[in-house]
Each structure stands twice: as C-alpha cells, then as structure tokens.
Amino acid sequence: MEMKKNDRFVLKIEDMGENGEGIGRLDGYIWFVKDAVIGDVIEAGVTKMKKQYGFARLIRVIEPSEYRVQEKCPSARRCGGCQIQAVDYQEQLRLKERKVYNNLKRIGGLSNLLLPDRDETTEKMMEQTAEQRAKETQESQEGNTRDFSVKEERRAETVRMEPIIGMEHPWRYRNKAQFPFGRNKDGKIVTGFYAGRTHDIVEQEDCLLGVEENREILSIIRNFMEEYKIEPYDEETHRGLVRHVLIRKGFQTGELMVCLVINGRKLPGQQVFTERLLEIPGMTSISLNVNQEKTNVILGKELINLWGEGHITDYIGAVQYRISPLSFYQVNPVQTERLYGTALEYADLTGNETVWDLYCGIGTISLFLAQKAKQVYGVEIVPQAIDDARENARLNHMENVEFFVGKAEEVLPEQYERNQIYADVIVVDPPRKGCDEKCLETIVKMAPKRVVYVSCNSSTLARDVKYLEERGYETERVRCVDMFPHSGHVECVVLMSKVQK
C-alpha cells in the first residue's frame, strides 16, 4: 500500500484491539486507529506504517457506530485511561468476552470453547475474526508464548463461557488513585493524569472513575503547595518536592488514606497539611512516602507516618483487610467480591481441602478460600504484602492460613519436594506475564484435583491453559469479570480439572 505520513483515507472499523483501538482493513492492509469505535466509518490520517499493518489518527467520524456514545469525561481522549469510554457499556462487555474467547481459542487451543448464548453461525463468524486478528497481534504475542507441542486430540464436549459479570453502575468504582503534580504552561500548579505514553499532565481533579473525595483532597494539597511555596517535582531537573499523591478509600468502612510522595524527607508546614486533611470526613491515615530516586516508579520504599496507624481497613464480603500505602489491593471492590466469589465457587471447597494460593498479595483470595478450606497456604514475593496478609488473617481470627515469602516458582517446589505438602486445589492469580514455567511444572507434579486460574491478561492465561491442558488437565468453566469498565482490560477465571484415567 502506497501511503505516507499524514495521508488521509476513509476506513470502516470492523473490530477493536487489545488496548481499545479501532481496527479496520483497506485493500487487505490492517489499520489501528485510537478513539475509533467498532462500526464507525471514519476519516483517518496516517501516523506510522509497517509491512503488514499501520497506525492512524481519527480525524472525523463520517458515520457513527450504533455503539458509539458521548463520553461523560471531557478529558477521556487526552487522558487515555478510559480507552473505550465512547463505546456503549453493553458492547464493552461483549468486546471483552470476545477478546478472552479469541485468545483461549487461538493461543490456548480450546477448539471446544463457545461464547455465552451464541448460535453456531455466530461462533463461525467469531472464529473467522480470531483468525484475522492473529496477524494483527502476532508481534505482541511472540514474547508471551512458549513453544509447546500442539495437542492433537481434544475432548469432544463443548465448554460454553459463562456470561461476563458487568457493573450496574460502572462509574466511581476505583478505590485507589495516583495523581502526579506539575506546572502548566502558565506556571500554575496542576494535577491530573499523564496523557497516554507521555509524562504530560492532563489537568483533571475529578476523574469519574474515582471517588468524589479525590477532588477535595487534591484541592487542599494544591492550595497548600501554593500557600507554602512548595514546588512540584520536575523529572528533567530532579528538583521540586511533591511528586505524586496516593489516595485510597475503603468502600465498606468509608476510611480514607492520603500518602504524599515527596523528593525529600520533610514537608514544610506538615502539621497544617495534616490538620487540613483531617477536616475531610473519614480521613484515617496520612503519610509521606520518600522517593528521591531518578525514576518513573511512583512509590519509594520508606514511609513517614504523619497521622493515624499507617493503614486503612476495608471488607470484601465478610473478610476484613488491612491496606497500607504499599499494599496491592484490587481497585474495584464491588467487582472484586464477585471475582473472588467466582474463584471460590470454582474451587468447590467442602471444608476438607488443602489449598495453595499462589501470587497471594495481602491474602485477599487466601482468606476468602480459608472460609471453606481445611488449610490454605499463600505465597507472595513482596515481604510487606505477607506482613499484611498475616495481619489480615489475625484480624479475621483465621488460623487455617499460612503464608510464605518468596517466588511461587521457588516456594512451591521446595514445600512440595522437601516437606511433602500437597494440594487438593491450587489457585493462581499471577501478574500480567502469567505463571512461571517452573511453577506450572510443579503444579502438574502435585496433581491437584482442580486448578483455578484468575487472570488479568487473557493471552498469557491462554498460554498457561494450553500448557496444563497438554499435561492432564481439562478446562471446564470460564467466566469474565469486568473489573475496569471503560478500559480495555478484563479479568477472567478459569476452572481446570485433573483428567481421571
């Protein structure tokens, strides 16, 4: 295709990609267009071209899709945090289901998988779409897939995905927000979010995904900085004091946390700073986080407590959790309860099982499982997370949980081979890169009756599902949970059971 940068063309958007970009074809050539919606007919402008695909910007919508809606947030396109806010929410859910479906069929080899409540004609259409998208995403998947032998025989029974669990009110769902501080072109102190793939701040103090208290907290901090002449941090010069603020809220308890990230060890006027924040109902924890490194990592390792006990608490279902500034805790508590409830349902515990929870964080899933298991072992590499996990077990008076610090791929083989600790059920909730292969090898050796895989990345999920399917496990249930409405991300739970010979 003979085109150059800034050339314009008309394109029909036929699909949407991993990150919410529109996908269309022109003369067999694939185009990715940010802000385009499936079903749109658009005028696009070339930004970059490669051999088999290219990137373009949306110039104007010629014919809007039936799924296109007006974004509620005026910063949606510039911010980039809500990649698909312009898509009708029900269609967002269908897009996410199809993404997981396509990856499990194409990468995972689950030829017997069906979409929820779809007829055969739709299934064939979806398979064709999956084949088309294979070329589109091949480059990004090469680093995520391992070269496993292809399993020739699949069981005959079909597995129909269960309907995705969406939200009734998909706004104000985030219990955590991190805002950078800087100065705009007029020299005014501003806060907001980084524009996509940049460190340019898009001014925004009331993200519609975050809690309403964020706006008041940010106003207090910004006014305080101006009054005390405190400079925001400048990444280029490594000067300035205030880098970010981390805000958390317990949805069940109403407790609020403010952690100010500074390029130093002391905040001028910090007593006044604390007093002003304490005027906000629910303020429970105020602290400083020291980050004096030249890095784009937000949080440093050292915390200085200004007020409170250094943490807040919240509940998921009946389980209470202590959450510190450095703790990993799911950002959507409403959907987290549904996600973990699905994992617990898939684990099918009777009270007699030994369960391993790998990549356990602060013990969120572990304690959920401990409500119905005989014994739960949790593994996490972050020592502070394990400290929180143990404290969470104590808070909930759960004595049938034990936690180990270390890599899952090291702790699990050691406990299995040296201490002969087995498992009836193994639950994994790994980071986006998926499970380490050594961890998967040990799971196969331990031969639990069931493996429950919770995933935030369906491509690495599919890769690991394929590994287990080729080594004696069958996929029985699949369900998506929309943890991040208006973004391209989706969580998924898969139940795999040991094949009985």
Image (tube, rainbow, N blue to C red):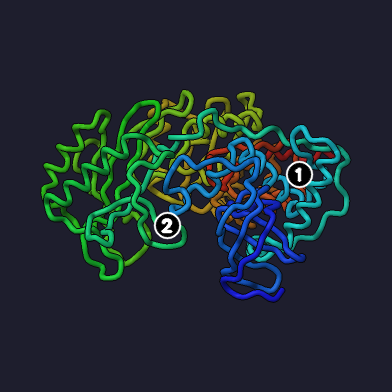
Q: Amino acid at mark 2?
A: Ala
Q: Amino acid at mark 1?
A: Tyr
Q: At x 49% / y 32%, what residue is drawn?
A: 367
Residue that mark 2 sits on: 195
Q: Which mark is residue 473?
A: 1
What SS does tag 2 mark?
Answer: loop
Q: Which mark is residue 30?
A: none
Relative height, residue 15 to residue 31 (above, below) = above
Relative height, residue 111 to residue 352 (above, below) = below
Q: At x 43% / y 50%, what residue is drawn?
A: 382
* Crowd class of label 2 (few under 14; some 14 to 19; many from 20; radius 10 Å): some
Which residue is situated farthest in the front direction here? 62
- Does 105 sit left or right of 284 as displayed? right
Q: Position of residue 267 (x, y in %)?
A: 16, 52
Is residue 82 visible in the rendered image? The answer is yes
Please state which of residues 384 and 224 is positioned toward the viewer in this rendering: 224
Q: At x 88% / y 50%, what residue is drawn?
A: 153
